[in-house]
Image (cartoon, rainbow, N blue to C red):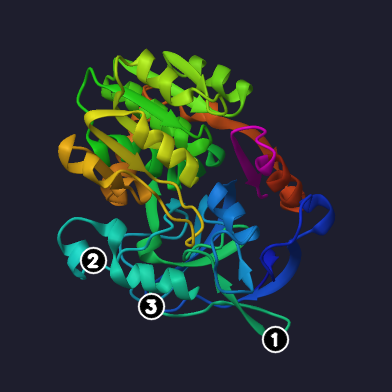
Amino acid sequence: MRIRAAKLTEMGRQPPYRTSRPLEIVEVELKEPGPGELRVKIKAAGLCHSDLSVIDGSRPRVMPMVLGHEAAGIVDALGDGVEGLSIGDHVVLIFMPSCGHCLPCATGRPALCEPGAKSNAAGTLLRGAHRIEGDGEVLNHHLGVSAFSSHAIVSQESCVKIGKDIPFEYAALFGCAVLTGVGAVVNTARIPPGSSVAVAGLGGVGLSALLGARLAGARQIIAVDLSAEKLAFARTLGATDTVDASAPDAVKQIRDLSGGGVEYFFEMAGSVKALEMAYLATARGGTTVTAGLPHPDHKLKLQAVSLTAEERTLKGSYIGSCVPKRDLPHYVSLFRSGQLPVDKLLTHKLTLDEINEGFDRMREGQGIRQIVMFD
């Protein structure tokens, strides 16, 4: 079938994107779903910094590609052998498919699925297929999803069924921002009630981590960002203190506010500089968690002896160390009950034709989560 999609042909075009137009809205051919695959009519797709990182070249991917990885929609076609999903089901798409058989999957860590990581890097679906073509060329899939399109072919392992009562613009947020941010707090760090916490980088993922920290019972939540607007917004979501990340004494401010450093620091900015600040502002015996994705060439420098002498922990968190089919329905239930108000993160609704302008807004630090809405 013919669909409309946002195609990226080359990385690194100069902003502003409203002028350089790195994402071209084109008609492409979407093949029928193969075995273990299904077609989803996309209803809402979120703009994430991980998409921007592909556009600007700091997260290299194979080109050309249809971008987008945070989305929700309706199943409208099934390939052979699909189990547990039916036409008409509402689903959230997951950007890390898990095979269920490799060692990480078998030991309860599907975020580290080896075939999933391999297929994501290659720009294919989990079983190695390409299902998008345009002008006679194969187009690559973005993280097995490619959601900046009216329809997408995805592996069944990239879907989690949800109730039909959740508006699509909010459901989409659970596929990346919520799983990654809340999961980093409750799965990766497993913070106990009464902890002191800081979060640097107040985008959709960082503010989801803030909501997760509040949900987990943190006694202190220090929000850290370059934007005064985002810092003020973080207070409305439960931050007890705020620090301007650009301040020369930002680390000292955080350490003073927390009485010597926070017990848990979550770096969500995707910046090595922010991660270094987070590590320096974490207390002796504390844990620094990062879910940021800086350019692969960027290196982290730290005082190695502090890991031992101060019993420090530095941890990475990918998709919030989540088991999506377990965690996503749980987070949705918390949203329903008002305990996880992720709807407050949605600041802009766009059409697909406005997507380049949306990434300009993100690049300029405006808004929190922007959602492309489809008919």
Foreground residue, 350 or 292?
Answer: 292
Please tell me in which quadrant of the rendered image residue 260 appears. top left
Q: Which of marks 3 and 2 is nearer the N terminus?
A: 2
**Mark 1 crowd level (few <14, some 14–19, many ≥20, 10 Å Cα):** few
* Image-based side of 174 in relation to 17, left or right: left
Residue at image location 65% in from the left, 46% down from the top: 372
**Mark 2 crowd level (few <14, some 14–19, many ≥20, 10 Å Cα):** some
Q: Which amino acid does label 3 sit on?
A: Arg
Where in the figure is residue 70, as x and y percent of width and height? 51, 50
**Residue 84 drawn above or below residue 28:** above
**Mark 3 crowd level (few <14, some 14–19, many ≥20, 10 Å Cα):** some
Residue at image location 71% in from the left, 44% down from the top: 358
**Residue 9 drawn above or below residue 371:** below
The numbered disc on residue 136 is 1
* Image-based side of 359 in relation to 264, left or right: right
Where in the figure is residue 88, as x and y percent of width and height? 47, 55
Where in the figure is residue 85, as x and y percent of width and height? 36, 59
Label 3 and label 1: CA atoms lie apart by 22 Å
Describe the element under mark 3 as helix, strand or loop. loop
As for residue 225 lying within the magenta part, the answer is no
To which residue does mark 3 refer?
Answer: 127
To which residue does mark 2 refer?
Answer: 100
Label 3 and label 2: CA atoms lie apart by 13 Å
